Every structure is written in C-alpha cells, then in structure tokens.
Amino acid sequence: MTRLKMLTRRAATVFLLLLAYTCAVAAQQLKLDYRLAMSQPSSHLFEVKIEVEIPRDAKPESLDFQMAKWSPGRYAVFDFAKNVQEFHARGGVCPRVEMTCTLPDFPVTRVDDSTWRVSMMNTHSATITYKVFGNDLSGTFSQLDARHANYNGGSIFMYVVNHKQDPVKLEIDAPKGWRIVNGRTDRPGQREWRFPNWDVMIDTSTEIAPDWTIDTFKVDGKSYHVVVHSFGNEGAKRPALVREIEKIVRAETAMWGPPDFDAYTFLIHFANDGRSGDGMEHLTSTQIIQSGMLADASTFADTLDTVAHEFFHVWNVKRLRPIELGPWDFTRPANTRGLWIAEGITNYYGHLMQRRAGIWNDKRLYDALAGQISEVDNAPGSRLMSAEESSLSAPFIDDAPHAQETNLQNTSISYYPKGEILGVVLDLLLRGRTQGKASLDEVMRRMYDEFYLKSPNATYYLRGRGYRNEDFERVVSEVAGADMSDFFKRHVRGVETPPYEEAFAQVGLRFIREARSPVTVGIGGDESEKTNFKIATVRLNSPAADAGIQEGDVITLFGGVRLNPGNLQRTVGRYKPGDQVPIVLLRGGKIMRMTLTMGPPLLFNFRIEEMPNASPEAKALRAAWLSGR
Ligand SMILES: [Zn+2]
Ligand SMILES: [Zn+2]
C-alpha cells in the first residue's frame, strides 16, 4: 500500500465521521433568531445579533457561522466577510423581558476567511453578535447612512453551516421615525418576520427610512406595491411611473398567467448620484437603483426598462430556474450553463414586453434588438465564447473586480445580449415554422408548468425543481414539432452567427447590416488622452494586432498624418483593404516604425425595418408577436 492510499483511507474515515456528526446536527433544526439594529447610521455599521438554540438531544462541540462569498443574482465573488468586524459569542440567550443581561464569553476561532467557529461549551444556546460595514446602494451590497438603511441580506446575515434550511426569525430595530418595508411586509409598522429558511430571508431586500413613499395597485386579485425612495427631484412623475409599471405587470402576467404570490413590491431608489445603478430580482420583490432622478425623462424610461426585465424574473430564474440556482453553496461561485436563458431571454422579453405594454412603439423595439445584435456581432469574444460558456464565465464577467489585467474584452461576450438575440431568433423561427401555432412564449410557459408548478419539490429551498439546458432544448423541439438540436449545437454550444435574416423575414422584417467604415485597423483610443492618440485596446485578429501594436503605444504619424484623438476615422477612411500604411509610434519613450496592412471591415451597424411588400401571413405573425395575442 502506498502512502497515497493510506492517506485516502484515513481521509475517508475522518470524512465518514464528520458526515455522521454533521447529519446528526443537521437533522435537527436549530432555533435561530436574528436581530438587526442600526444605532449609529452615520457609522455605516449594521449590528447583527443571532440567538441560537440547539435541541436538547444534540450536542455539537461547536457551530460554524459563515458569511457568503457571493449572493444570488450577481455571480461574481465579493467575499462579504471582508466587511465583518467585532464578532463575539456568548453562552446562553438573554430573556426577552430583560434586554441586557450578562452572559459568559464563549471561545471563537476564525477557521477561514469566511467562517467563525463558536465552541458551545456543552450548552444548548448562544448569542452571537457582530457588525457589518455597508455603504453601497446596490442590488448586492448594503447601505446604512444618515438617510436610510437598504440591505441585501446575503451581505449582512451569516448562516449556520449545515442549517441554511432551518426556519429563521428576524426582528429589526430601526432608528426612531424610520419605517421598514420589504417584499414580505403584510401589515403597517411590521418589524418582525418569519422565513422558512435563510435563503428566503436573504432574498428579501429591505428598506428602512423615514421618507419613502408607497403606491399600490391590483392586477387579477394580486397586490403590487411601488415603494420609492428619491434622493432627487421627482417632477411629480410618480403617478405616471406607477401607471406604466401596472401596464408592464399586465403585459407579463398576460403571457405567463397568475404569478405564485399574493403581493409583490417594486423597491425603487432614485440615487441622483450619477453612479449607482442596479436591478435585482427576488421572489416577491425587486430592488432597483437608478443613478438619476425621477424627474429626468431618460431615468423614467430606464426605470421602466429595468422594471420590465426584473418583473419577468418572477417566473424566469426565480421560480423556473437552472438546476444549479438554488439551494446554493455560498463558499464558491455558482456555475450554470443556463444564464443565457435565465438572463438573456429575460432581457429579450424585458424589451418585447415594453412594446406589448404599449410603452414602446414598433421602431423602438426594432432599434433595441438591433442594438443587442450590434453588441454581440461586433464583439470579437462572441466568435470565441458560446452562450453556454458565457453563462459558466459569469463569475468573471458579471461586474467582477479584476486585480490583474485580463483579455476578456477580446475573449468574452455577455450572456445578456447573447441570450437575448438567441431568444428573438428562436421565437421568430418557431413562429414562422409553425405558421404562428408555436412561439417562445409557449416554450417558457411549458417550462414553468413542468419544472415549477408540476414537479415535486426537489429540495427544501423552493417549489419544483431546476432544469438542465438539455431540458430546455427538448421543450423547444416539442413546441416546434421538429428536432431543433442543430440550432443548439451551432448557436448555443457553438459560436456560429444566428440566422438573423431568416428569422426576421418570418415576420416581414428586413435585417440590414452595413459596414461602419470601409476598412479596419482594430485600435481603440484612450479617451482620457486629449492631445495624443494613445491606444487603449487592440482588437484580436485585426491589422493592428498583426502588425504588433500594443496597448499603451502612442501613434504619432499614420501614413504621414499626425494622429490625434479626433481624426482617426477621417485619416483611416482614405484607405482601402490591402493598402500598406507606414506608421510611427512611441513605445516607452522610443520611436518605432511599422507597416500596417489595412483590413476589411470588422465593425457593422444593424437596422431592422419593415418589408414594404411583406405577405399578409408575415404581417399577421408580426402582429401576434408584438401584441402577444
Ligand atoms: Zn432608501
Ligand atoms: Zn436579470
């Protein structure tokens, strides 16, 4: 027997022992009471208390309290533990009537970057306290300041390892005069909630402030609350905003049928800081942050765009979900191939629903779709990264911070536009090939029915079970009444350009592709440079890359013309593909000479227009697509 095998056997024994131990504890529910306070808002410190009681017949030596590394809906790893301070554990729980009592300190060991181990000292209860710094208004982080507290639970609340599935109670102590609201508020003045598990608690983003407003409307017997906290001028536009949101709710529920909740809350901030902007989906709410003020026309329109996207998530991703999306392991990023469906197809419908709701006209939708196609088709990464790979790369590309330089601008494509264009192409092909009998609407409804409504619950976390990409492919083929596997092989797992012309022609639309300029160099200028043409980006497989130009080079002469940040297009436009152009550049203070061979166009503009001579059948399909009827 080799050393390796010995180690394996010993490791296996230890693992089995651990498993037996953790199962014994995990099988018995803990009593978990969370308490959130914010006694000094300007310190940005949330104060968390967790009172834990262990069943009498369980005797764990210790309990592990862990901070998540990321939170659902944003897939990059942020390590929320970095903002935790002053973690303490004490034996026992103070009786409620006597809010302060003296409890003995319990030993705490920091086990790793995210985990605090509390020795239970042969007792059955403990009180854990810690503070978390939060000063980011976003869909993932949290903010506490003199104006408000707005938190996303994943960045605030630790879970007990192996006990995420246990029911939890939450009590919030708000500063005097501050009111609390979230997507599970069901009575005025509420400050206590019970959640079936930790996952649902952190799915319930909460706003606490003296001055938010609430407007309510009903659709099909369900209540919808629009909570607004404005840090800028509203221009008396709130009633109009609420009316437009109601149109979106009506358009989306018309497609899906009744949502699985009694009430839903749109939690909207107008940050008026030109910087904060986000949208995050939850089971019974969405957290939306706009960087402008409601009075701005562009902010008003952006808000509706975000609302249409986030509300579609009520079905697509929050309930109909890829199998990897819940319950989660928060110690490592979630990996799923399905984000092009969960996010990309949601992006498509977010746009389409604004047309169906009567907020956008036809041209506005066509321009939005052409814009998405432009983003994908002009990105070199979309020739390298498939929709599935893009989904798997989410931890790198979903707002992830990068300490090192990366080549992602050349090698990656976002699953939002990539999924959106696959969504529209699939939708129109399905409509065309079935003479309007089938559509992507039907695919989504069938998926929701099969995986959310009708499947037995697979885990503690939520109704139904998650789907695999293969399931989605099967349902598309079933709805199409034809084998669609070739589409998935070429355009979902492969990187071939989707058949845009064919798809738009089904509904009497012409797809037009025009070169942005007759030639390509493949360089982008540094926008912070006002006088010199300094290179910020070099496109993969471009004439500039072939010539050996690199980021940071300053091009002084281009074919004898002095280049500046304003004259690149004009200077380059004099050439045609194949022309040899001498250039002079500065690299690290040294003058270098190179010859560039101009290439064919790599960047295109796209337009979608109505065909003047479209057939009545194609026009009827278009009307059904745009109206959802
Ligand atoms: Zn607020
Ligand atoms: Zn989304």
Image (cartoon, helix red, strand yellow):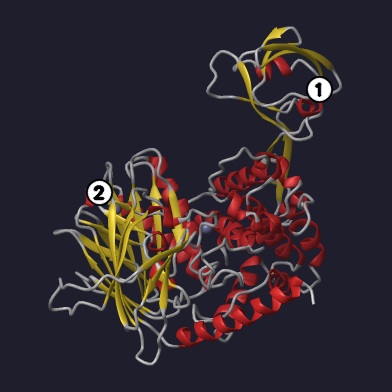
Locate residue 360 relative to residue 559 in the image: left or right: left
Locate residue 225 relative to residue 298 in the image: left or right: left
Residue 537 picture quarter = top right
Q: Residue furthest right?
A: 578
* Camera sees residue 284: no
Q: Nearer the viewer, residue 341 or 221?
A: 341
* Camera sees residue 433: yes
Q: Is residue 400 above or below residue 575?
A: below
Q: Which residue is drawn at 19% across and 59% down?
A: 178
Q: Name the residue under label 1.
A: 598
Q: Mark 2 points at which residue?
A: 43
As drawn, the label of residue 279 is none
Q: Which of 360 and 192 is in front in this view?
A: 192
Of discs 2 and 1, which sits in the foreground? Answer: 2
Q: Is residue 173 above or below residue 209?
A: below
Q: Is residue 407 above or below residue 256?
A: above
Q: Which residue is drawn at 40% across and 51% down?
A: 138
